[in-house]
């Protein structure tokens, strides 16, 4: 990503950040090494007959740590996919799962392909063949390795993979739990598609409940009116920016996409821009705001919050000095390189790190996996019972007030809200919010509790590594 030769690779960046944290811990050198390295990376090259010839594709699945199984992590479709990247992402998954306490080890996969170059039926053939190669080696498996969507993949690809696994394991009653992020009608869960963006929103909301942390970033007040620049209006960026705009009153003043960037100090309508991109394959020509071809320049524009949600390494040695945001929330994985991280820390910029900020996806994937294994949708048993108990209470209150000639009525809005039992979506959101809030409190607590911990990333690593170490201790390693 970087033009500067001194920039470490993504994998090295993750290692450097890890090393910064373990330097503050008292781990035995052997254990430190065990936690840092990737256990295994499988490379596969396979051919698919398409467009009159055999096309060869290269894919990876890396397993970073099996201290808990299954291991978990997305599958990315992009031309830039390589072993270094997949291993870095797998390592981040280990720490991410630990930070939000989902009982998985870390893994990640990728296929070197530009999905936009292939028709849907071709992509299905390629995906099924890739899934076959992985499943054959238990790298897709409900109890060993459970992929999910990432850049360039979504619920369509997950449905193909789940179906491929099921065809290969016809008697496995738990086959649906082999991947997460599936469509709801194919064993998915409500709220998974939006989960990572929703998690970014919950993370920012929790940050703004911590006055000391806000002070460190030089921010005041609430999220309402905060000026945000977002990079990447895909799954994560779109949902995150949309919820922050529609529900928290944030102003999305900049949107950076593949083909350039839009800027409007009065705020851009996220939904409109997303629809424009879908129709025109980019932001260029959008009727409001100013368009710049060199989109990455907008990362350096003044704003309150910078929300990179596209690629790794976009804030690097070449532009870190020019970043003006006071707060960066890493919705993407690895958007800030280790070198840039040091520069930004020096400048006093607060970074909410990827391993926590984008953990909403894996959290809801965990709920989906549990749902698949329990073979029942969340809320099915208790929703109506909950509604009936609430109705009983309201009827009794109304009877008492009537018998005592007390003249009061409940507002219809309150009544409807109170009477509505929680369905799957409400339960998923509640579980996700709880997870994001609890994890932030733990990370922020670590930041303030120790003088030698000067940033949220190191604090998050300390929390995560502690949890991985406890698992190893329990295993007797
Ligand atoms: P996506 O493919 O849905 O969206 C990526 C977006 O970035 C697209 O709109 C694309 O056009 C845009 N983009 C690509 N290159 C760009 C460039 N050079 N400049 C600006 N924009 C560019 O992917 P996603 O699932 O939203 O993932 C984005 C990031 O979030 C990745 O780092 C991924 O690892 C991370 N992440 C995703 C999830 C998830 O649940 N999908 C979970 C955790 C982390």
Image: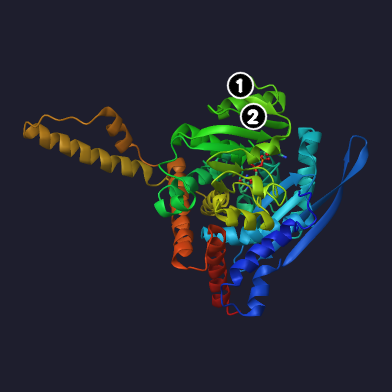
Labelled pair 2, 1 in contact (Cβ < 8 Å) = yes
Q: Distance between the residues labelled 2 and 1?
A: 8 Å
State the residue in front, 22 or 167: 22
Mark sitting on residue 288: 1
Judge whether 51 appears above or below 275 on screen: below
State the residue in front, 95 or 131: 95
Decide if residue 296 is in sight here: yes
Which residue is the extreme one toward the right? 53
* Mark 2 residue's CB less than 8 Å from ligand 1: no
Judge whether 219 appears above or below 373 on screen: above
What residue is drawn where x is 86% and y is 50%? 46
Ligand 1 sits in quadrant: top right
- Name the residue that disc number 2 marks: 262
Decide if residue 118 is in sight here: no
Q: Which of marks 2 and 1 is nearer the N terminus?
A: 2
- Give percent across and percent down for residue 12: 73, 62
Which residue is the extreme one toward the left? 404
- Give percent across and percent down for residue 404: 6, 34
Mark sitting on residue 452: none
Q: What element carries label 2?
A: strand
- Give percent across and percent down for residue 447: 48, 62
- Give percent across and percent down for residue 139: 72, 58
* Mark 1 residue's CB less than 8 Å from ligand 1: no
């Amino acid at each position: 990503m970087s033009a500067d030769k001194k920039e470490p690779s993504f994998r090295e960046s993750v290692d450097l950040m890890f090393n910064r944290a373990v330097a503050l811990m008292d781990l035995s050198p052997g254990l430190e090494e065990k936690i840092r390295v990737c256990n295994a990376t499988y490379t596969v090259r396979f051919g698919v007959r398409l467009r009159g010839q055999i096309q060869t594709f290269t894919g990876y699945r890396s397993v970073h740590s099996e201290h808990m199984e299954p291991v978990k992590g997305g599958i990315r479709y992009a031309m830039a996919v390589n072993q270094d990247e997949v291993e870095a992402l797998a390592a981040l998954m280990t720490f991410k799962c630990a930070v939000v306490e989902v009982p998985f080890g870390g893994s990640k996969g990728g296929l070197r392909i530009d999905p936009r170059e292939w028709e849907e039926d071709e992509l299905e053939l390629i995906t099924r063949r890739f899934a076959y190669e992985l499943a054959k080696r238990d790298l897709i498996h409900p109890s060993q390795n459970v992929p999910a969507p990432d850049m360039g993949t979504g619920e369509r690809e997950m449905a193909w993979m789940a179906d491929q696994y099921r065809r290969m394991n016809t008697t496995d009653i738990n086959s649906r739990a082999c991947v997460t992020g599936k469509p709801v009608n194919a064993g998915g869960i409500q709220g998974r598609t939006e989960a990572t963006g929703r998690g970014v929103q919950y993370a920012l909301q929790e940050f703004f409940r911590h006055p000391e942390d806000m002070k460190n970033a030089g921010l005041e007040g609430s999220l309402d009116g905060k000026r945000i620049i977002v990079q990447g209006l895909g799954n994560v960026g779109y949902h995150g920016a949309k919820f922050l705009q529609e529900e928290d009153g944030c102003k999305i003043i900049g949107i950076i996409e593949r083909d350039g960037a839009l800027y409007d100090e009065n705020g851009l309508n996220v939904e409109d821009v997303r629809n424009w991109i879908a129709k025109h394959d980019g932001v260029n020509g959008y009727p409001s705001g100013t368009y710049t071809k060199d989109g990455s320049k907008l990362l350096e524009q003044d704003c309150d919050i910078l929300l990179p949600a596209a690629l790794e390494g976009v804030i690097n040695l070449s532009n870190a000095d020019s970043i003006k945001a006071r707060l960066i929330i890493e919705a993407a994985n690895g958007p800030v390189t280790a070198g840039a991280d040091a520069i930004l820390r020096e400048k006093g910029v607060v970074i909410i790190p990827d391993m926590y900020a984008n953990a909403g996806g894996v959290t809801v994937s965990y709920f989906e996996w549990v749902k698949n294994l329990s073979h029942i949708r969340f809320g099915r048993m208790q929703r109506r019972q909950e509604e009936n108990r609430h109705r009983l209470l309201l009827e009794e209150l109304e009877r008492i007030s009537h018998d005592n000639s007390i003249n009061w009525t409940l507002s219809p809005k309150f009544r409807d809200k109170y009477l509505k039992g929680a369905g799957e979506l409400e339960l998923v959101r509640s579980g996700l919010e709880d997870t994001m809030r609890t994890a932030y409190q733990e990370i922020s607590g670590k930041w303030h509790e120790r003088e030698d911990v000067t940033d949220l990333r190191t604090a998050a690593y300390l929390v995560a590594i502690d949890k991985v170490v406890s698992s190893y201790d329990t295993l007797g390693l």
